[in-house]
Amino acid sequence: MPVAKKGPTALAIKRKLSHNGDTPKDTKENPQKNRKVEEKTETPPNSMIGRLRSRNRGGGTPNYNESSNTPEKEISKKLPFIKYKGKIEYYTQSQDIAFASDQLLDWVNKQTDKEKIPIAFDMEWPFSFKTGPGKSALIQVCADIKLCYLFHISELKKLPAALIQLISHPKVVLNGVNIKNDFRKLARDFPEVDAEPLVAQCKDLGVWCNAVMGTGGRWSMERLVEYICKLKIDKNKAVRMSRWHIQPLEDVQKLYAAIDVYISQVIYYELEKNEKIKLEAEAKFIEENGEKALKAIKDLGENFV
């Protein structure tokens, strides 16, 4: 993962503010100086931002294209696939789902040294091009990267109270990629669920990645896994579009569903680590140069990660 670099000096700030890809005004007065500036000037005009980000990411991550509003596009096609070797617990009966949810709740309540507890969350449901999306069929959660829970809810008329308490717990931060609509769908299929508190408290990993890493655009799970973890996730269409409402699930479906929440939890920890690096670097920069200098250098694309 990227490693934080030492913050820019005051002299570096002045140079970036005065140049910023523009042609110097003293071309005739000092041709030698102008020649040096031209040697450093790149194309396109936003090359300074690209150079800053390339430096901050150690050259291992492709530069974000400032002219577009999409995430990084140039990612290696030779990345290895995710290999999940943890445990998968799969439940179909309401009482079993309630028991497993109670166990997770007990674990959450014992984490007294933590203000927030991340739990990866995802859902699956069948889809037909004729009839559209079916009822919510599967809930996946992962609190420990060595254990994923699969709750098959397609036959349930009402969700167990313990499961609702778990996902609504004030210390729990449900995380995933584009998961806000999952909560709204769950609430439509199971009216006992209040979607809005879940939406307000969750952590969308794509949005968080943009804030921490200085990227932009809307992320898919596949691209976020490649960018953050340097791995590929198998999004086999035959499995993705399979009959998630049929019990029991096939082993290939279980593995597909478990990997989604497992890798979400991994991404959460990576972004959390990088956010800490960024905040520490910014605090040190402010101490040395002041808040106005921080704002100025951020306007030029510096991201401190």
Image (cartoon, rainbow, N blue to C red):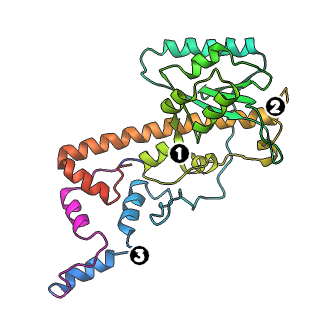
Front-lying residue, 53 or 165:
165
> Is 298 included in the stretch rendered in magenta?
no
**Image quadrant assignment for residue 122:** top right
Name, please, the residue furthest toward the bottom: 28
The three-letter amino acid code for the residue at tag 1 is: Gly
Q: Is residue 58 above or below residue 22?
A: above
Residue bearing the label numbered 3: 43
Magenta part of the chain: 5-28
> Is 14 included in the stretch rendered in magenta?
yes
The circle drawn on residue 245 is 2
Residue bearing the label numbered 1: 206
Pick whichever of labels 1 and 2 is earlier in the sequence.
1
Q: Is residue 185 above or below residue 105?
A: below
Q: Marks 1 and 2, Cα distance to the nearest angstrom? A: 28 Å
* Element assignment for label 3: loop
- State left or right for residue 266 relative to residue 241: left
Pick whichever of labels 3 and 2 is earlier in the sequence.
3
Q: Marks 3 and 2, Cα distance to the nearest angstrom? A: 53 Å
> Residue sitting at 21 percent across and 53 percent down?
293
